[in-house]
Image (cartoon, grey):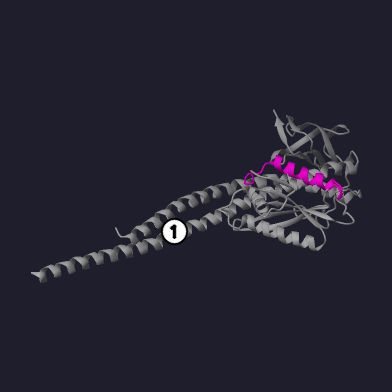
Amino acid sequence: MASSLLQVSVVAADQEVWSGAATMVVAKTSEGEIGILPGHEPMLAILAGGEVRVTTEDGSKITANAAGGFLSVENNNVSVVASAAELVA
Amino acid sequence: MGAQLRVYRQKIRSAQTTKKITRAMELISASRIQKAQARVMQSTPYSRAITRAVSAVATYSNVSHILTTEPEKIQRAAIVILASDRGLAGAFSSQVLRESEQLAELLREQGKEVVYFLVGRKANAYFSFRQRPAERVWTGGTDQPVFETAQEIAGAVLESFLRDYADGGVDEIHVVYNRFVSMVSQVPHVVRMLPLEVVEGVDEPGEDEVLPLYEFEPEADKVLDALLPVYIESRIYNAMLQSAASEHASRQRAMKSASDNADKLIRDYTRLANNARQSEITQQISEIVGGADALSSAK
């Protein structure tokens, strides 16, 4: 794929916690840790551990806590969805 | 002061105090509508993401799941009624209750037993006054619903959905709530939540838009297992938020017309009071004149 960035959004039940462009997303699913780079195939996974690490466009890292949610990837759009999610500083 | 005049003055004062209250409630509701609407907006990304995911699983994989398959025979149906905690909101609670009575009637005609889950003190009062049983009741916080309540409700209805008919479980779940159409229009709305008719409204993929071939982790049915309860939660939460926004809008309108009505009453009574005062004065003058006449002719 030509575009080399992921559009990531971290969404909680009552608000959108974070959204923006990223180069990599690392999350822990029920099967183990998974890293998502641009061009990843469409996927739907259940998150096990809460921590989701996002490496943003400019190289800084963001950690979000999204326990008991799921992760969906399609066309370089990544959504991390959980009933309660928050950014960890 | 004449008796008549005193009565009018009293009525004016009483209308004025009522107006102060209704005006205050109107302003409070007006300011809360904005917040309630904002919360509906803020929850949209979540429900959109979930709806998309559920539709992806449902359309791509052909797993059949207990939550999506229609039972052969529906014997008992549950109705979840979202009303309000407090009155003074016009027809808000009564229109929801009326709608659910109609739905219950329809379901009974189809030979189904009906059980109720009630949200809001008004719904509870309606049922307990008629001494009708309700499966479960939640009260408090209908004007500012929190996600935890939605989870609790979703948990309770799912639990009774998964139970067998023989153990008092239900085969079908309907939700009745006031949908927020606009500031001036809130209509009672019925959705059948379970068994799921997957994906209506929100974000239906277009005819030509093909959903991508998903990889599931773990298997598709496990993902569906985890996803569907969440989907129900988010649908119920959305309904609760809409209901809250409708409640405020409905209360604002009701209180506005109450204030206007008080204004009109005050105006009418002021006219009458003026009339009474004038006729009192006229009477006094004619009494004085009459008295003076009598005195002068008696000399």
- Could you tell me residue B109's position as x and y percent? 80, 63
The crowd level at tag 1 (other Cα within 10 Å; few <14, some 14-19, many 20+) is some
Q: Which residue is mark 1?
A: B263
Q: Nearer the viewer, residue A63 or B189?
A: B189
The C terminus of chain B, quarter of image: bottom left
Residue at the extreme front of the image, as rendered? B298
Residue ID at (23%, 64%)? B284
Q: Nearer the viewer, residue B92 or A89?
A: B92
Q: Place residue A24 in its image quadrant.
A: top right
Secondary structure at numbered mark 1: helix
Which residue type does callout 1 highlight? Asp
Q: Chain of mark 1?
A: B
- Could you tell me residue B70's position as x and y percent? 87, 54
Question: Is residue B153 one of those drawn in magenta?
Answer: yes
Question: Is residue B96 one of those drawn in magenta?
Answer: no
- Could you tell me residue A61's position as x and y percent? 74, 29
Q: Is residue B38 above or below residue A87?
A: below
The N terminus of chain B, quarter of image: bottom left
Q: Nearer the viewer, residue B271 or B38?
A: B271
Residue B298 located left or right of residue A1: left
Q: Is residue B190 above or below residue B287?
A: above
Q: Place residue B159 in its image quadrant.
A: top right
Q: Is residue B3 above or below residue A81?
A: below
**Can residue B248 be spotted in the picture?**
yes
Residue at the extreme bottom of the image, as rendered? B297
Residue ID at (67%, 47%)? B41
Q: Is residue B253 above or below residue A40?
A: below
- Provide the residue span drawn in magenta: B141-167
- Could you tell me residue A57's position as x and y percent? 74, 34
**Can residue B49 be spotted in the picture?**
no
